Image (cartoon, rainbow, N blue to C red):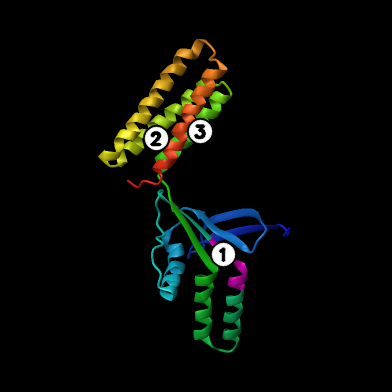
Amino acid sequence: MLPRTSIHTRTTDPEGKVIYEDDREVQDDRVALFEGMLQARTLAPIREAKRDVTRVAGVRVVESEAISTEVTADLDTVDAYLGRASRALDDKKTDEAARALIMAQVRGVDFHYAKEDTPLAEARDAIWLAKRALEENNSTQAQTNLGIARQQLEVYRQVIPENRRQEVNQLMAEVNRLDAQLRQEANQSASQAERSRQGNVMARWWDEVNGWFKKRP
């Protein structure tokens, strides 16, 4: 039941260049400062401040397609510490003001990050789209998505250890068999029962690929 608020966020680097802008409706006191990839120099000072005060390391801010990063600000917390800093400056207590500013970063800014195997994610999504296409009896679009899945599975297969490639090879072989079957059906419509069977097969593939995310190369 909280009121909705329209938030426009703009994040700039130390030179003033805009590197992120966002418009959204929120119902809480936390807003996104950044979602996605980010120049390390922009968030590194905040990360270092959090590390110095809490002595907790482990969050790496990097420019890599393998790491997605989200940064959020708790406005109530940030506002409280900025108020302390302002009052300290009014009293000529620069050291106290500096500590308050550091705490605004430490307590008011949170990092959320996740590593994702991009080829595997794209293969998973393509399998699901192929399943949806067959549900609409669109075998041509299903074949296109199966082709994307096969390409991304091959990319993924190349970067994982040899002892884990067999399960990927097996899935790729199954994808090839279904693709060949759909090509043979080009001049005729498959029965509803056959479409249901094919959909169940792809749902199993989707579950299998999701399970691979728990295994690190």
Q: Which residue is mark 2?
A: 152
Secondary structure under the numbered disc 3 in the rendered image: helix
* Amino acid beneath label 2: Gln
Q: Earlier in the sequence, mark 3 or mark 2?
A: 3
Question: Is 78 contained in the magenta span?
Answer: yes
Q: Which residues are magenta?
A: 72-79
Considering depth in this image, is 74 or 131 the residue closer to the camera? 131
Q: Residues within 10 Å of mark 1 (few under 14, many from 20)?
A: many
The residue lying at 39 percent from left, 67 percent from top is 57
Question: Is 214 contained in the magenta span?
Answer: no
Q: Kindly check if marks 1 and 2 are in contact, taking CB atoms under 8 A apart as contact.
A: no
* Amino acid beneath label 3: Trp
Q: Residues within 10 Å of mark 2 (few under 14, many from 20)?
A: some
In the image: residue 141, left or right of residue 86: left
Alpha-carbon span between mark 1 and mark 2: 36 Å
Alpha-carbon span between mark 1 and mark 3: 35 Å
Front tag of 3 and 2: 3
Secondary structure under the numbered disc 1 in the rendered image: strand
Secondary structure under the numbered disc 2 in the rendered image: helix
Q: Which residue is mark 3?
A: 128
The residue lying at 61 percent from left, 78 percent from top is 83
Judged from this view, the residue extending furthest toward the left is 162
Considering depth in this image, is 152 or 6 the residue closer to the camera? 152
Q: Which residue is mark 1?
A: 73
Alpha-carbon span between mark 3 and mark 2: 14 Å
